[in-house]
Image (cartoon, helix red, strand yellow):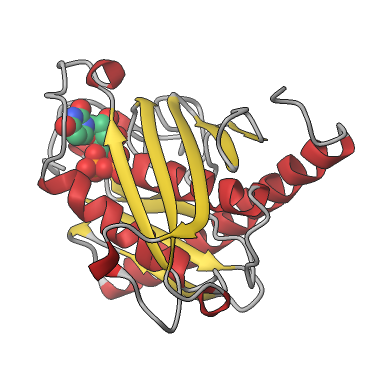
Amino acid sequence: MSGTTDMILVNKDGKRIDGRTPDEHRDIKIEAGVLANADGSAYVEIGKNKVLAAVYGPRECHPRHLQDPTKAIIQCKYNMQTYSVSDRKRPGTDRRSVEISKITAEALEKVVLTELYPRASIDVYIEILQANAGTRCAGLTAASVALADAGIPMRDIVPAIAAGKADGYVLLDLNKEEDNFGQADVPMAIVPSTNEIVLLQMDGNMTREEFDKAIEMGVRGCHDVYKLQKEALLNRYSDGGDSDE
Ligand code: UDP
């Protein structure tokens, strides 16, 4: 997020470098139930991002001192594969992955009926196979489909997308160039049935008016993602529920 570049990110016709209009998201593909050995799973592509999510549980929480006698805890692990980015990513946990794991679990806790499973753990693994900006949103989108695929009771599914600002324009779903050279990135996630925002972060600067516009664009984008999440789950079960076998 440098905020400056000689590159034209939005041309005079209002088109972005990948041909999108400011309020258009990248192509999105969502598939539920892609792994045979997880309780639930999903695969998501958003533009050039490729993300897998797998869910185990609810199962007895280990280590035991983490158990909550009133509800299940959600333990999330976001991991960016070494080969997912152009400069080799050092394997293992870093501050960024700890932060993204935490905000993802917190967003999911808003919809999962954790009170049904005291002392249990619901484990969510997110693997970024290919990254091109927006991986936390793609990861959360995949994780909530994987939870639903695991049959875990939820109030709703959580869709996520980022809005932001580049070349002075408020844009939906920034790609890597827009994220690198733009002025702001605002990832968000909502509970579609209520429009409650369950994840909201901001990197960079924008005016209050631009921020309001970014939220409006992002919420609309989340509803588009939501439609595709539901379609993925419907396809999974209309296929007979064993597409991973
Ligand atoms: N990125 C990278 N190496 C890293 C972390 C990030 O190349 O160690 C790239 C990757 O393409 C990622 C983008 O920078 O999608 C933006 O990262 P950010 O931290 O803003 O999170 P994201 O937008 O992926 O949620």
Looking at the image, residue 245 lies above or below residue 190: above
222 relative position to 89: left or right: right
Q: Is residue 11 visible?
A: no
Res 4 → quadrant: top left
x and y percent of residue 42 in the render? Answer: 58, 37
Report the front residue among 66 and 10.
66
Q: Residue at x 21, y 44 (%)?
A: 97
Q: Please determine whether, in this image, residue 178 is positioned above or below residue 62.
A: above
In percent of width and height, residue 233 lies at 74, 45
Q: Residue at x 34, y 66 (%)?
A: 200
User: 228 or 74: which is nearer to us?
Assistant: 74
Q: Is residue 229 visible?
A: yes
Q: Residue at x 48, y 54 (%)?
A: 160
Q: Quadrant of residue 16?
A: top left
Question: What residue sits 56% from the left and 54% below the top?
Answer: 221
Total numbered circles: 0
Provide residue 195's location: percent of width, then percent of height: 57, 75
* Viewport quadrant of the C terminus: top right
Q: Quadrant of ligand 1?
A: top left
Q: Nearer the viewer, residue 164 or 108?
A: 108
Q: Is residue 92 left or right of residue 243?
A: left
Residue 91 in the image: state x and y as whole percent: 16, 25
